Amino acid sequence: MTREQNNLTPLAGGDTGKATLYTGLECHLCQLARDILDEVLGPGGYREVCISDNAELKETYGTRIPVVASANGAEKNWPFSTGQVRRLLAK
């Protein structure tokens, strides 16, 4: 199963609580968002959730993906920069 198929990639040590990236299938902006999160948290340093097969998540995030969410529930819709993600996660 790939990340695009709703595979949740754990952080080192199994902690997936720092950030979640909501993505979709065939989403070119989602790859740009992955690159930013890889830079901020390291590859595999966040949880990724593909919304494509979940009606509730599609309704919530469908027109906004990619979306990064911190553990405290704060969210940032695309577009976002590495600095914006760092500030979001520092809250």
Image (spheres, rainbow, N blue to C red):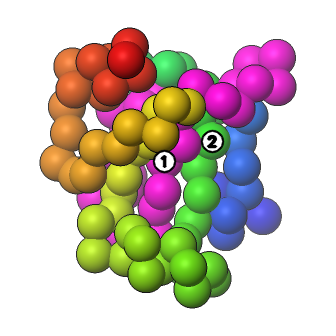
Would residue 25 be found to the left or right of residue 65 on screen?
Answer: right
Q: Is residue 29 above or below residue 41?
A: below
Q: Amino acid at mark 1?
A: Leu
Q: Label 2 to label 1, Cα distance in Å?
A: 6 Å
Residue at 54% x, 42% y is 20
Residue 30, labelled with which disc? none
The quarter of the picture where residue 56 lies is bottom right
Residue 87 in picture, x, y percent from top left: 28, 18
Do residues under tags 2 and 1 come within 8 Å of each other at their CB atoms? Answer: yes
The magenta segment is 11-38
Residue at 70% x, 32% y is 16
Would residue 81 be found to the left or right of residue 89 on screen?
Answer: left
Residue 47, labelled with which disc? 2
Q: Is residue 27 visible?
A: yes
Number of marks in the rendered image: 2
Residue under label 1, please give it.
Answer: 21
Q: Amino acid at mark 2?
A: Arg
Q: Is residue 7 above or below residue 62?
A: above
Magenta segment includes 20: yes
SS for dot 1: strand
Residue at 32% x, 25% y is 88
Q: Is residue 34 visible?
A: no
Give whichever of discs 2 and 1 has the lower sequence position. 1
The quarter of the picture where residue 52 lies is bottom right
Disc 2 crowd rating (10 Å Cα; few below 14, some 14-19, many 20+) is many
